[in-house]
């Protein structure tokens, strides 16, 4: 194994480890909220979350960890995996996603949905309860998909 290949493998491992850390904390925060609230959330439950400091902190952590997870995967993990596979990553991100789709890691349209949700979060979601509920419910539905993507990358990494 050449030194470049080893460096790329270490980058994949580090980026995967960071992604899994964000996913674990995201899951833990959902677990804490689900002790009191049923997902998908309804408006009454969300208003109660806003009134409870602990629950509000968990909902904020969910949003933060989802954003960080999406950032790490899109900006680091996907590229490091393709570099390790010997592919050029100096190309449009859509081409990178197409390569990942060919590897059966993620569907391009699914990633755009995840990215769009991340972009929605970067706007001031706290001004509208409806938007905030939609974001939390969407993250709840997407977290399992992100977990599957990370598991596929881990299998590829272990098999390389």
Image: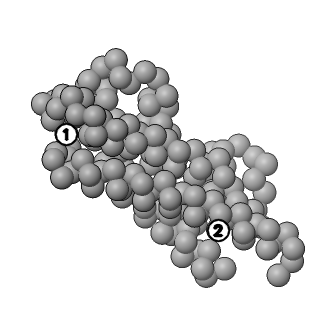
Instruction: Evaluate whether residue 143 shows in this view.
Output: no
Question: In which quarter of the view is residue 5 placed?
Answer: bottom right
Q: Report how far apart the C-alphas of labels 2 and 1 lie in the structure.
A: 35 Å
Instruction: Evaluate whether residue 27 shows in this view.
Output: yes
Q: Which residue is outermost to the front?
A: 53
Name the residue that disc number 2 marks. Answer: 13
In contact (CB < 8 Å): disc 2 and disc 1: no
Q: Image point 87% across, 74% down: which residue? A: 3
Q: Which residue is outermost to the left?
A: 44
Q: Which image quarter holds the N terminus?
A: bottom right
Mark with earlier residue (2, 1): 2
Q: Image point 24% across, 29% down: which residue? A: 50
Q: State the SS at label 2.
A: helix
Name the residue that disc number 1 marks. Answer: 41
What's the mark number on residue 151?
none
Q: Image point 79% across, 74% down: which residue? A: 6
């Amino acid at each position: 194994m050449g030194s470049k290949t080893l460096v790329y493998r270490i980058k994949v491992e580090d980026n995967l480890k960071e992604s899994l850390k964000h996913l674990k904390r995201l899951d833990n925060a959902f677990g804490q909220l689900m002790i009191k609230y049923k997902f998908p959330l309804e408006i009454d439950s969300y208003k109660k979350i806003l009134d409870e400091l602990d629950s509000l902190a968990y909902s904020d952590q969910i949003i933060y960890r989802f954003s960080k997870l999406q950032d790490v995967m899109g900006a680091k993990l996907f590229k490091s995996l393709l570099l390790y596979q010997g592919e050029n990553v100096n190309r449009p991100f859509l081409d990178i996603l197409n390569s990942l789709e060919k590897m059966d890691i993620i569907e391009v349209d699914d990633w755009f949905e995840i990215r769009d949700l991340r972009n929605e979060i970067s706007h001031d979601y706290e001004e509208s309860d409806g938007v905030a509920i939609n974001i939390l419910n969407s993250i709840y539905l997407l977290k399992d998909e992100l977990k599957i993507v990370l598991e596929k990358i881990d299998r590829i990494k272990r098999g390389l």
